[in-house]
Amino acid sequence: MNGDKTGRINGCRADLSEGCILCYQGAKMVLFVTGVCGRNCWYCPLSETRRGREVVYANDRLVKSPDDIIAEAEMMSALGTGVTGGEPFLVLDEVVSYCRLLKEHFGPEHHIHLYTGIAPTRAQLEPLRGLVDEVRLHPPQEIWAGILASPYAASVEVARELGFSIGIEVPSLPGIEALAAILPALDFLNINELEWSETNAQAMRERHLDLEDNLHNAVGGAAAWAAPLLDDPKVHFCSSDFKDSVQLRERLKRISKNTARPFDEITEDGTIIYGVLKLEDGKLPPALQETIYEIEVSGDQVEMAWWMLAEMREKLPGRKYVVERYPNGGIILEVTPL
Ligand code: SF4
């Protein structure tokens, strides 16, 4: 990890919560347990395919059975899981059973953190003891100024008594400095840079908010609202840039390592590169019949190392190109004709 003299690592402090450290390594699976939520935050970033729907996703994989959760976690060699939604407490029984499954399969050291928009009571938190390690509360913006008198302050006390690591995780919005009042009671306060999404764009415009630049989803001003809190060692500011670059790249690398074929080249960004030959007559050219290198034939398409395709291009009739994509059949980023 690269840190500067302030102890920050790519905008985050060195004393991150356990959940954040694993996230930094791209080692946390995101388990989305429901798109249903009793709140209606104007900045809610959930996509239309998830919002309000009773769907479960492990990263981007639609979960049809609990086995899919284990398969996804294994594919990325996950060291932990972040449970999110929607509102996880609306499907508490399922959350308990998924967390138990993960802890039983990967061992008690598989670190689980859980986000919630409600202020959970003792009765709601108790079933999660021994299954969830870290609870992250998301109190609504309207109550930040009176946070100590809110039910969230009571949840913090109960969570601590029950042995959870307890923190608050909210987007950076005007008025966030009021959360300084509850900092002494917390293990951490995570501030996410406010992000623009397709579903919250209209609400952003109504509030005269705009993108910081044309490269990221960060909303202009979000970093400045959080600034008064950032000197406290319990506070971590998670930038949109960090999520896009470090977190995603590290997760892709883990998936590539587990799923790349022998001839796929894994890039520094965790994407894979390989060469494709489209057969003209469906027959494998002699040069490929004799090759000692691994190839994969599927219908009229032959996939191989990109450098091998480049070296043999004169001997291989048909359309040839190099593909860069996310691992495990993920989205194609670039196709370069050879
Ligand atoms: S609590 Fe979370 S999921 Fe629910 S509306 Fe707010 S941002 Fe969206």
Image (tube, rainbow, N blue to C red):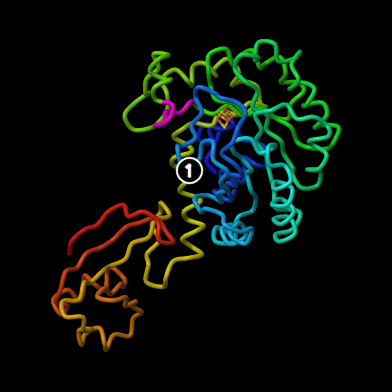
When asked about the image quadrant of residue 310, the answer is bottom left
Looking at the image, which residue is at 82% across and 26% down? Answer: 157
Please provide percent x and percent y for residue 117. Answer: 65, 29
Please provide percent x and percent y for residue 206. Answer: 40, 15
Q: Quick check: is 18 in the magenta stretch?
A: no
Q: Quadrant of ligand 1?
A: top right
How crowded pointer 1 is (Cα within 10 Å; few <14, some 14-19, many 20+) is rated as some
Q: Quadrant of the N terminus?
A: top right
Horizontally, residue 224 falls left or right of residue 142, namely: left
Callout 1, which amino acid? Val
Q: Give the residue pinned by disc 1.
A: 246
In front of the other: 115 or 322: 115
52 lies above or below 26: above
Please provide percent x and percent y for residue 312. Answer: 20, 76
Horizontally, residue 129 falls left or right of residue 262, namely: right
When asked about the image quadrant of residue 313, the answer is bottom left
Q: Quick check: is 199 in the magenta stretch?
A: yes
Please provide percent x and percent y for residue 100. Answer: 75, 53
Which stretch is magenta?
194-200
In front of the other: 128 or 1: 128
Looking at the image, which residue is at 47% across and 46% down? Answer: 248
Looking at the image, which residue is at 64% across and 27% down? Answer: 138
When asked about the image quadrant of residue 19, the answer is top right
Q: Quadrant of the C terminus?
A: bottom left
77 lies above or below 47: below
